[in-house]
Image (cartoon, coloured by chain):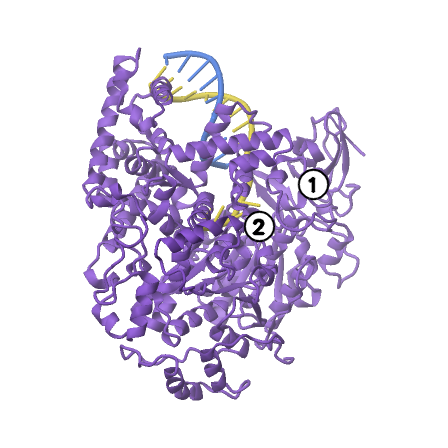
Chain colours: A purple, B yellow, C blue
DNA sequence: CCTGACCTAATTTTT
DNA sequence: TTAGGTCAGG
């Protein structure tokens, strides 16, 4: 391979220990693992006077790393951006760095904050770090943004007048709430779809725009109404003592901004902040990081006065603590969550956001063959506005990519199954080496059907989420209503589930009372006797229900563990009885799911109940290993008494929590430490089996069934969406459904060339304020994101990559023809060995024997599967111009223009349906996309 | 207040 | 295809 491209031209800012380490490293390959091992100890001693406690075998943290990786691991002094290409070992760098910080730079683990994108990634990192540095890893904060923020909020939310027992609303809850809001405001649901409104609100929150500001910024009527809905939505959230996912970040930022002394606490406490997948952070998350790590102490002028107050409080503010060292790692080419507000601006502007920052580039790929990388590069290079970066590998070319054109999604799945079996026979692959990727969860179905039939073991990751199933949501709603009386949404969800004779009327009566008295629905429920004209039967049923809820609230107060409360709720509510008495076979599954939930709760409680009480505390042994200076430092950072290891700060900390709440230990359903201050033990999750803790876990940790658990899934083929695949790698990857409208997804295609028109649609308006200028790009932003998704998918493969598509795909019960994915065209032909070029059921123009399918496809974007828009050849069986009735039915193909009597000019995007009843998806611009029945629609082909 | 028939709409990705 | 929502009737 060519010369190693890692040496950065910039002058590095070096700290003493970095220099020490660098001195050990011969410029490049010269340094062997042994020399490092041998030399490491004495030199390190310079920066830490004492040998480390616990005779943990010395691990060479730099072994096997290339110079750029080492540089990243050792970096000190300035904020640093590690631009890491796919498969360049960034996770490795992060874990090694953390271990290095703790093991060599003597950073206390309690002062490390590492942010990962998913909970799973957090768990894995925790695990890997623990392998390197042992149990001390427990003291670190390694979590997602959301989990970290919730922990901060739980300590200090009361400063905002919210209770620490707040509920966390997920998207489904938010949706429900927004529907209520829309109802109340009387907004036309046609013009203000819940989905779009939520998306809009979410964007506001990501941009840290509160509803008042949003209202003041509104220029159009639509914006004003959006803002009004936002305001009402927030009001209801607050009333329910709830936060939605976006609030968790936004509120944390507001908290830190509103209380500078609090922010300073965290700035002192965290000495190192590391963020993985930085390309997937949104604006709010960026600001959060900035608040914690910016070198400019107070960026907002408004903070200046407060900082002084900070001094008055007697905190050691003249002891001007350096902000935490920041390291972010990311790859803008793998940014696939822009739809959710992530912005690569954060990466692109890192150096101006954090003055003095430096960038380390990791371009060597350790995962894939050069062939695979070439394909990935060829695809991603099509995106404009991207910093050039080329991955290279020393792994050799490896086999060609295999291409396959299937007749149907079924055929596609069969090919995949056959191929896996074949590989397994020949190459001694395990099933676990293989992954099948698809764009949408629905596509897993065909694979499952086939895999089941041929007896291939598989595992679907993701998919219909456990916590989204109705029965699970019901159970959770019960628990939330019990834990948080103000949680109207949850309470009303289960008010009459299972049926207990409380209908709309009774519910409305309670709601009226609540509105009149300005109390929560839950409180009103306890005062039904104040309702006039309520049927006695209804009143009795309501009272019974209230008693049921009271009894369980009492259990919470008495500290009954979560699993018992759950079990009691399900039984006493009659929920289990209703399901087990049902004929519906689906209900059986529901029962099983509930059983599983109970199991989850049980496990949670078992884990949360400390076996060895000292596990999560700073033990004497821990302290014994620290030098006096370290102890002093520790005291400064964490407020832990160096003598006892106990929290010494409750009294001295600024009022961090509502005294009423912390005074009585028994009544705090959260079981949190007495004050909200920063304890060292807070580095580890509190061993808390309470209901509140369980709900928090449920809200934040989406999936109970996780991804490859090495041993368990060793013999199992993994099926997952491309998004889920991020961060994983497999020997053999099947990237399936490579058809325009499937992947890239239909929605990303609609906007192509139509961005100007699209802006009037509320959907796009909701996604409005993404970064750069809306220049005339060839591809829409959405399409570029799809392309990055393709890039992610391709780069998951280590050795073998398969690209497949189906000529006919049944979507929602109707067969659909889609042209090949444009991403296929973008991969150089020489990299692909087409096992099968065309479907048996269609006749394609094939200009020459050697012509690749792509040549044909390239002939026309949009001509779709029709080998020419004339339709004369009647290639597709589903769309023949053959039988026809009295009326002349136009034969349509993607790309055709049509005139509709009502919607005007439109462009055919795709076709579907059957001979008898052909359908066409037509884009009418501002009128949106319509699926028309070609036979009946008032259209004329142009 | 409940049930069942009908109709419709919506189908991306995740904390 | 299906999961929800609405409506009429019991």
Same chain, labels 1 and 2:
yes
Quarter of the image with the N terminus of chain A in it: bottom right
Q: Which residue is mark 1?
A: A909
Does residue A425 appear to the left or right of A854 in the view shown?
left
**Helix, strand or loop under label 2:** helix
Quarter of the image with the C terminus of chain A in it: top right
The chain letter for the residue carrying disc 2 is A
Q: Sequence-wise, which precedes: disc 1 or disc 2?
A: 2
Distance, label 1 to label 2, CA atoms, is 24 Å
Q: Position of residue A920 (x, y in %)?
A: 68, 36
Does residue A851 appear to the left or right of A463 in the view shown?
right
- Look at 54% across and 39% down and name the residue there: A199
- Residue A338 is tagged as 2
Q: Position of residue A863 (x, y in %)?
A: 75, 46
- Look at 33% across and 33% down and name the residue there: A486
Q: Closer to the camera: disc 1 or disc 2?
A: 2
């Amino acid at each position: 391979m060519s010369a190693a491209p890692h040496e950065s031209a910039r002058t590095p800012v070096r700290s003493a220990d970095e220099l020490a380490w660098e001195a050990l490293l011969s410029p490049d390959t010269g340094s062997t693992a042994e020399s490092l091992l041998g030399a490491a100890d004495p030199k390190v001693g310079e920066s830490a006077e004492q040998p480390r406690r616990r005779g943990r075998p010395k691990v060479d943290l730099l072994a096997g790393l290339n110079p750029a990786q080492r540089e990243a691991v050792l970096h000190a002094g300035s904020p640093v951006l590690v631009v890491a290409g796919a498969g360049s070992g960034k996770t490795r760098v992060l874990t090694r760095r953390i271990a290095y910080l703790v093991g060599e730079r003597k950073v206390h683990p309690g002062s490390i904050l590492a942010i990962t994108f998913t909970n799973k990634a957090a768990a894995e990192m925790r695990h890997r770090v623990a392998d390197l540095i042992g149990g001390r890893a427990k003291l670190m904060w390694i979590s997602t943004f959301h989990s970290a923020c919730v922990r901060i909020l739980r300590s200090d939310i009361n400063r905002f007048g919210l209770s620490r027992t707040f509920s966390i609303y997920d998207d489904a809850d938010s949706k429900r709430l927004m529907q209520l809001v829309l109802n109340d405001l009387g907004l036309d649901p046609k013009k203000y779809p819940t989905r779009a409104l939520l998306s809009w609100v979410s964007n506001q929150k990501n941009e840290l725009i509160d509803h008042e500001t949003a209202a003041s910024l509104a220029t159009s009527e639509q914006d004003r109404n959006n803002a009004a809905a936002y305001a009402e939505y927030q009001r209801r959230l607050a009333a329910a003592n709830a936060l939605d996912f976006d609030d968790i970040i936004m509120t944390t930022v507001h908290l830190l901004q509103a209380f500078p002394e609090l922010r300073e606490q965290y700035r002192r406490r965290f000495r190192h902040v590391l963020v993985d997948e930085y390309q997937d952070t949104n604006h709010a998350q960026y600001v959060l990081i900035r608040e914690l790590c910016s070198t400019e102490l107070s960026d907002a002028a408004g903070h200046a006065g407060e900082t002084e107050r900070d001094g008055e409080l007697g905190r050691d503010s003249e002891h001007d603590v350096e902000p935490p060292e920041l390291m972010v790692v990311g790859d803008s080419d793998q940014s696939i969550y822009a739809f959710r507000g992530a912005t690569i601006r954060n990466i692109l502007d890192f150096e101006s956001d954090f003055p003095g920052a430096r960038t380390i580039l990791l371009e060597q790929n350790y995962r894939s063959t050069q062939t695979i990388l070439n394909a990935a590069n060829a695809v991603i290079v099509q995106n404009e506005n991207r910093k050039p970066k080329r991955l290279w590998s020393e792994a050799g070319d490896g086999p060609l990519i295999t291409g396959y054109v299937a007749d149907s999604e079924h055929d596609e799945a069969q090919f995949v199954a056959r191929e896996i079996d074949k590989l397994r026979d020949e190459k001694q692959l395990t099933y676990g080496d293989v992954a099948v990727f698809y764009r949408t969860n629905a596509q897993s179905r065909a694979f499952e059907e086939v895999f089941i039939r041929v007896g291939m073991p598989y595992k679907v990751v993701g998919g219909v989420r456990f916590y989204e199933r109705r029965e699970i949501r019901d159970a959770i709603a019960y628990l939330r209503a019990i834990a948080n009386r103000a949680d109207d949404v949850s309470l009303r969800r289960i008010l009459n589930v299972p049926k207990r004779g409380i209908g709309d009327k009774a519910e409305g009566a309670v709601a009226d009372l609540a509105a009149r008295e300005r109390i929560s629905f839950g409180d009103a429920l306890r005062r039904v006797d104040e309702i006039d004209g309520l049927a006695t039967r209804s009143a009795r049923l309501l009272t019974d229900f209230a008693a049921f809820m009271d009894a369980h609230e009492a259990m919470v107060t008495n500290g009954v563990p979560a699993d018992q409360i759950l079990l009691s709720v399900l039984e006493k509510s009659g929920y289990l009885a209703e399901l087990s008495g049902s004929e519906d076979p689906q209900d059986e599954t529901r029962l099983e799911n509930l059983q599983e939930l109970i199991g989850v709760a049980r496990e949670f409680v078992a884990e949360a109940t400390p076996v060895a009480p000292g596990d999560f505390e700073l033990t004497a042994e821990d302290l014994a290993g620290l030098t006096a200076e370290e102890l002093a430092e520790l005291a400064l950072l964490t407020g832990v008494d160096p003598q006892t290891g106990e929290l010494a700060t409750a009294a001295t900390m600024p009022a961090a929590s509502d005294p009423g709440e912390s005074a009585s230990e028994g009544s705090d359903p959260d079981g949190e430490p007495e004050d909200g201050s920063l304890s060292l033990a807070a580095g580890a999750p509190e061993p808390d089996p309470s209901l509140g803790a369980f709900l928090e876990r449920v809200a934040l940790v989406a999936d109970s069934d996780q991804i490859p658990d090495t041993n368990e899934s060793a013999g199992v083929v993994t099926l997952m969406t491309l998004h889920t695949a991020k961060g994983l790698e497999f020997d053999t990857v099947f990237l399936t459904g490579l058809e325009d409208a499937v992947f890239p997804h239909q929605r990303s295609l609609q906007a192509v060339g139509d961005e100007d028109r699209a802006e009037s649609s509320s959907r796009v308006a909701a996604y409005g304020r993404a970064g750069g200028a809306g220049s005339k790009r060839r591809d829409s932003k959405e399409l570029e994101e799809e392309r990055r998704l393709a890039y992610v998918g391709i780069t998951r493969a280590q050795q073998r990559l398969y690209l497949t598509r189906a000529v006919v795909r049944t979507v929602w019960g109707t067969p659909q023809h889609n042209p090949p994915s444009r991403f296929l065209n973008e991969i150089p032909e020489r990299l692909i060995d087409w096992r099968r070029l065309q479907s048996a059921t269609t006749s394609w123009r094939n200009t020459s024997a050697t012509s690749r399918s792509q040549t044909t496809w390239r002939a026309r974007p949009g001509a779709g599967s029709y080998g020419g828009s004339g339709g004369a050849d009647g290639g597709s069986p589903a769309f023949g111009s053959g039988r026809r009735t009295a009326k002349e039915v136009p034969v349509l193909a993607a790309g055709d223009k049509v005139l509709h009597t009502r919607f005007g000019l439109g462009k055919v995007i795709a076709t579907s349906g059957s001979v008898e009843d052909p359908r066409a998806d037509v884009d009418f611009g501002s009128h949106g996309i319509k699926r028309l029945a070609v036979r009946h629609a008032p259209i004329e082909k142009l």
